[in-house]
Amino acid sequence: MKIGFIGLGIMGKPMAKNLLKAGHEVVCFDIVAEHVANVVAAGAKAAASSKAVAEQCPIVITMLPNSPHVKEAVMGSGGVLEGTKAGTILIDMSSIAPLASQEIEKACSAKGVKMIDAPVSGGEPKAIDGTLSIMVGGDEQVFNSVKDILLKMGSSAVHCGPIGAGNTTKLANQVVVACNIAACAEAFTLAKKAGVDPARVLDAIKGGLAGSTVMNAKVPMMLQGNFKPGFKIDLHIKDLANALDTGHAVGAPLPLTSMLMEMMQTLKADGCGQNDHSALAKYYAKVSGTKIGL
């Protein structure tokens, strides 16, 4: 099947390549020419715009940083909706505000385009190996018609409800991840300050109730002082901002999310916005005077 892919950043690039590996023809576009060239080298075809992608493909995937970028790529000048035909399916895999997903879907529906929101969790490593967790909102029949395609990029794809439900689920995911990373950073700073080797603490507790995928992935990075981004602080700030806005809109209190937002904003102010979100360890190093690792 010919699939359009718009947005070839840290996540989009390996996702598009996994579609190529699965035998699909991919037509791609990104505003960064280097990113397009990288995916073209893997076998994709380049297009000159989002409109040009949509003109060639019955299914179009977008994987962009935030709500304004998706709106521009889909609804803006030279966007997807200028090139689509009735019956085209748009799969937005970006992590954006649920209300933005609903707004974009209305514009799509007016042109006979079917849309689902399908944000992902797992970061760059799982994007590379095709084991992302995919959370989907929208018409269930549309979801079922593209589920096999989603499972070329992820190990699971779950329909969560109507349009916007995928992004609401993703916001819940990001709250849990942020709190988990911060808890790890706080706990391992405690161990280091108390004179106990954090690496041994990890070995001792990772198989018990405290163990988690987050701990297994992020604490080794803290121990190594390696904050090369799989998922950037700046992007997690974006997600937490969307979570807080959504929480305010529906009356859901998010005190822990508010605290995590301020911790991440402190890191951003210190020039760490492009670090991996495991750099929450740097926040604790700043306030405690002690690094967990190197």
Image (cartoon, rainbow, N blue to C red):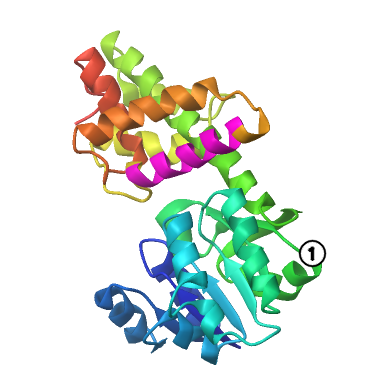
Looking at the picture, how far across and down is residue 125, in whole percent? 42, 56
Residue 24 versus residue 165 in the image, above or below: below
Which residue range is magenta in the image? 234-248
Residue at position x 38%, y 19% in the image: 186
- Tell me the element at label 1: helix
Tell me where residue 209 sits by quadrant. Answer: top right
Question: Which residue position holds label 1?
Answer: 140
Q: Residue furthest top?
A: 194
Residue 290: quadrant of the picture = top left
Residue 24 is a magenta residue:
no
Q: Nearer the viewer, residue 174 or 88?
A: 88
Q: Is residue 142 left or right of residue 283?
A: right
Q: Is residue 152 left or right of residue 143?
A: left
User: Residue at horizontal 48%, vertical 28%?
Assistant: 179
Question: In the image, what residue type sits under mark 1?
Answer: Glu
For residue 275, above or below residue 40? above
Front-lying residue, 108 or 137: 108
Residue 127 rendering spot, x and y as whole percentages: 46, 61
Residue 23 is at least partly visible in this image? no
Q: Residue at x 55, y 67 (%)?
A: 153
Density class for disc 1 (Cα within 10 Å; few <14, some 14-19, many ≥20) is some
Task: Examine the image and state in which quarter residue 115 appears.
Answer: bottom right
Q: Is residue 37 above or below residue 233?
A: below
Return the residue nearer the eye: 178 or 23.
178
Judge by depth and name the residue closer to the eye, 216 or 56. Answer: 56
Please name the residue shown 36% across and 26% down the image: 262
